[in-house]
Image (cartoon, rainbow, N blue to C red):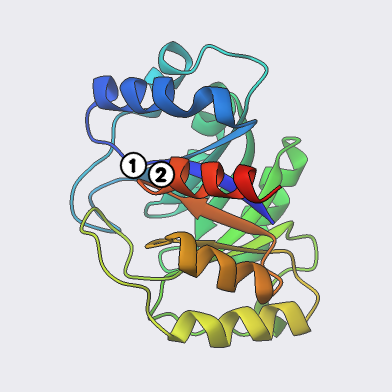
Amino acid sequence: MIIIPTILEKDPIMAEERWGDIKSKTRWVSLDVIDGVFSYGRTFDLEQVRKIFPDDNKLVEVHLMVKEPIGWINKTIEAGASRIIGQVEMMSDKSSFVAKAKEEGLEAGLGWDIETEFDPKEVPPETDVVLFMARKSGFEPQPVDDKVWIKIKAAKKAGFRVGVDGGINKKIADKLEEEGVDIAYVGSNYLNIVNEKTKRN
């Protein structure tokens, strides 16, 4: 299981400070983008990403928690993204989003908030990763909701590459790995989990 640090910040200075703390430990970074429509609050502008993350050797994923993610694809390209994940809740057409991202040379993923039903049959076959929020998306911390485990089982049974984001600590990370999750997206607990994993190995 790959563990990828997430950055969810309103202030670009805070985002830059967090990146300074974690960049030596990771090859990937996932930027959470909230537009104030999908969820309350807004994150820093994507136009600032190149200044904050100038290291071209790192791989950037952009997780779009926005209205009509397809309209943000060009911004993610300008930000240097390697992979883009769009939340399905405010997306008109999953297939169009995935196809557009793939046409632009990006890996394409789809995300489901914790209360959103997941049907494997509705996932375009070209999708590179399905991402499940383990709690309600947004800035407020909340515990992991047990509904995420049902979605994980369904997605793995259908043969999808699965990522999980939200509320992950060391105990949850271990359980995710046992369930066959491919990517764990971790916020404030990232260094604790990675350092513990290093000790074990």
Q: Secondary structure at mark 1?
A: loop
Query: Crowding at label 2, few (<14), some or many (≥20) Cα neighbours within 10 Å?
Result: some
Return the x and y of residue 26 as percentages of the image width and height: 60, 32
Return the x and y of residue 129 as percentages of the image width and height: 68, 59
Residue drawn 72% across and 52% down?
99
| Viewer can see residue 76 | yes
Residue drawn 77% across and 81% down?
158
| Viewer can see residue 92 | no
- Give the spatial CA distance, label 1 vs label 2: 5 Å
Please say if 130 is above or below 75: below
Please say if 57 is above or below 98: above
Rendering quarter of residue 7: top left
Q: Which amino acid type is marked by label 1?
A: Leu
Front-lying residue, 164 or 124 = 164
Q: Earlier in the sequence, mark 1 or mark 2?
A: 1
Return the x and y of residue 146 as percentages of the image width and height: 43, 85
Q: Secondary structure at mark 2?
A: strand
Is 135 left, or right, of 109 in this rendering? left
Residue drawn 31% across and 69% down?
136
Please say if 152 is above or below 68: below
Front-lying residue, 84 or 103 = 84
Residue drawn 42% across and 11% down?
51
Rendering quarter of residue 11: top left
Quadrant assignment for the N terminus: bottom right
Is 45 left, or right, of 193 in this rendering? left
Q: Which residue is mark 1?
A: 8
Q: Which residue is mark 2?
A: 32
Q: Which amino acid type is marked by label 2?
A: Asp
Please say if 103 is above or below 171: above
Query: Crowding at label 1, few (<14), some or many (≥20) Cα neighbours within 10 Å?
Result: many
Q: Are marks 1 and 2 in contact (CB under 8 Å)?
A: yes
Instruction: In the displayed orientation, state which residue is furthest to the front.
Output: 199
